[in-house]
Amino acid sequence: MLARFFDSDFFYSFRRNPVAMVSAAVVFMIIVSAVFSPWLAPHNPFDLASLNLLDSFKPPFFQADGELSYPLGTDDQGRDVLSAIMYGTRISLTVGVLAIAFAMVVGIGLGLLAGYAGGAVDALLMRIVDVQLSFPAILIALLVDGIARAALPREFHDRIQLWVLVVAIGIAQWPQFARTVRGSTMVERGREYVMAARVIGIPSVRIMLSHILPNVLGPVLVIATLNLGLAVLSEATLSFLGVGLPPTQPSLGTLIRIGNDFLFSGEWWVTIFPGLTLAVMVLSINLLGDWLRDALNPRLR
């Protein structure tokens, strides 16, 4: 199986694209450092017993008063910025991946239904998509987050805020999946293999899931990769605005918001390093998505 993959045109295209290889390496390192942050991070920034306010606002190690034990300095609570970035990246990636998975399930399901059924069902679903696409995605996410906060008791807010963010960002992202899948499904439903499946009496749900879905996954994977960066940015934006995750679970957006209060007082590292991490991660994901779009396009082979 691996030998077949390494001999494929897909892997050959990857080896011939230095930008894709560098982007994949950066994304891989970020994912590894995030997933294994409890073991790789120099400190546990969420362990209150280990925090010391006397260590607050220590500069990075390359400055005069910096220490190697805090390579990127500390914040106002004495937390190691590097460790906080590693833990925060894990939270940001978790929200982004779960939100894209939710958007894919909703978007693919409704796109298949609209493209295969056609008629009034297609018109109704696509008008809903058109209405939602007329609003900025971040506004939709803010609306869903606000409704959840108003509907749920205050004591549950911090406990389920991660899932509220996942649903809010997922609802904002699903129309792109639905439109792409709907267009591909409308093409595939006229193919001979779909007509043959109808003739022999295969149920419509099975035709959509077993026959049409595998043939429309290529564009979906490209959109998922590109939208992952947007989902991470949306989470960071919501957290920066103060409606994201609580300070006890700081993501990259929360770290940037906290550090922004001290940016002009000289403690620039508290916000600059989380911001650079977010920018590099999103840029690498987008570059990888651009390569994936070209690699899966048969016209460019």
Image (tube, grey):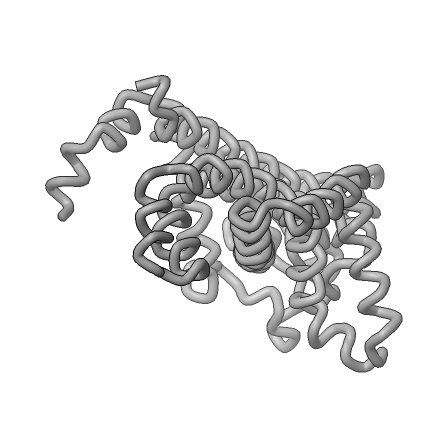
- Pick the quarter of the image with the C terminus: top left
Q: How many marks?
A: 0
Residue sitting at x 82%, y 46%: 139
In the image, 88: left or right of 219?
right
Residue sitting at x 33%, y 22%: 17
The residue furthest front is 199
Percent position (x, y) of residue 12?
23, 26
Q: Is residue 15 above or below residue 46?
A: above
**Residue toward you, 173 or 92:** 173
The residue furthest top is 300
**Residue toward you, 92 or 289:** 289
In the image, 225: left or right of 118?
left
Percent position (x, y) of residue 192?
32, 39
Residue 256 showing in the rendered view: no
Percent position (x, y) of residue 223?
52, 39
Percent position (x, y) of residue 24?
38, 37
> Splitting the image into 4 quarters, where does residue 44 fall?
bottom right
Residue 235 showing in the rendered view: yes
Residue sitting at x 46%, y 46%: 30
In the image, 257: left or right of 251?
right
Residue sitting at x 73%, y 39%: 268
